[in-house]
Image (cartoon, rainbow, N blue to C red):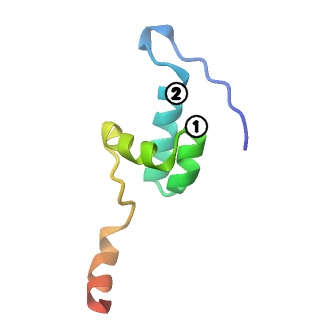
Amino acid sequence: MITITLYIPDSLGMDNREIAMLVASRLYEQGKLSLGQAAEVVGLSKRTFAELLSYYSVSIFNYPASDLPRDVANA
C-alpha cells in the first residue's frame, strides 16, 4: 500500500478519516477497490464502510445494470 500526503485547506473542516472515506468510496464506486479493500483504506470494518456509503451517494451494489438481463435469464 502506498502513503499519500495531501494538503487540504482547514476551511473545509474535514478530518483525515472523512477524506479517506471520500477517496475510498469513489475508488469502490469505480470498481478499483473491493468493499474489503476500501474499508481497509479507511480503517473500518466492511459492514461499517458499507453502511456509510449512502452518505457519499454510493450504492453498495457495485454491479453493472447491463448484466442484469443475462443474470435473470440464467436464473
**Farthest bottom residue in view:** 74
Which residue lies at the image location 31% right of the left edge and 74% below the top edge?
A: 66
Picture layout, residue 67 above or below residue 20 = below
Picture layout, residue 20 above or below residue 40 = above
Can you tell which mark lies on residue 61? none
Of 50 and 15, nearer the camera is: 50
Other-residue count near label 2 (Cα within 10 Å), few / some / many at <14 / 14–19 / ≥20: few
Which residue lies at the image location 35% right of the left edge and 38% below the top edge?
A: 56
**Cα distance in 3D space between marks 1 and 2:** 8 Å
Residue 14 in the image: state x and y as whole percent: 46, 18
Q: Amino acid at mark 2?
A: Arg
- Closer to the N terminus: mark 1 or mark 2? 2
Which residue lies at the image location 33% right of the left edge and 52% below the top edge?
A: 59
Q: Which residue is mark 2?
A: 17
Other-residue count near label 1 (Cα within 10 Å), few / some / many at <14 / 14–19 / ≥20: some
Asked which secondary structure carries label 1, the reply is loop
Kindly indicate whether the residue at mark 2 contacts the one at mark 1 (C-beta within 8 angstroms).
Answer: yes
Picture layout, residue 12 above or below residue 73 = above
Of 17 and 64, nearer the camera is: 17
**Image quarter of the N terminus:** top right
**Image quarter of the C terminus:** bottom left
Residue 62 in the image: state x and y as whole percent: 39, 60
On the picture, is 2 further left or further right than 24? Answer: right
Asked which secondary structure carries label 2, the reply is helix
- Mark in front: 1 vs 2: 1
Q: Which residue is mark 1?
A: 43
Residue 32 in the image: state x and y as whole percent: 54, 55
Which residue lies at the image location 27% right of the left edge and 90% below the top edge?
A: 73
Q: Which quadrant would residue 74 be assigned to in this image? A: bottom left
Q: Amino acid at mark 1?
A: Gly
**Farthest top residue in view:** 11
Residue 22 in the image: state x and y as whole percent: 46, 35
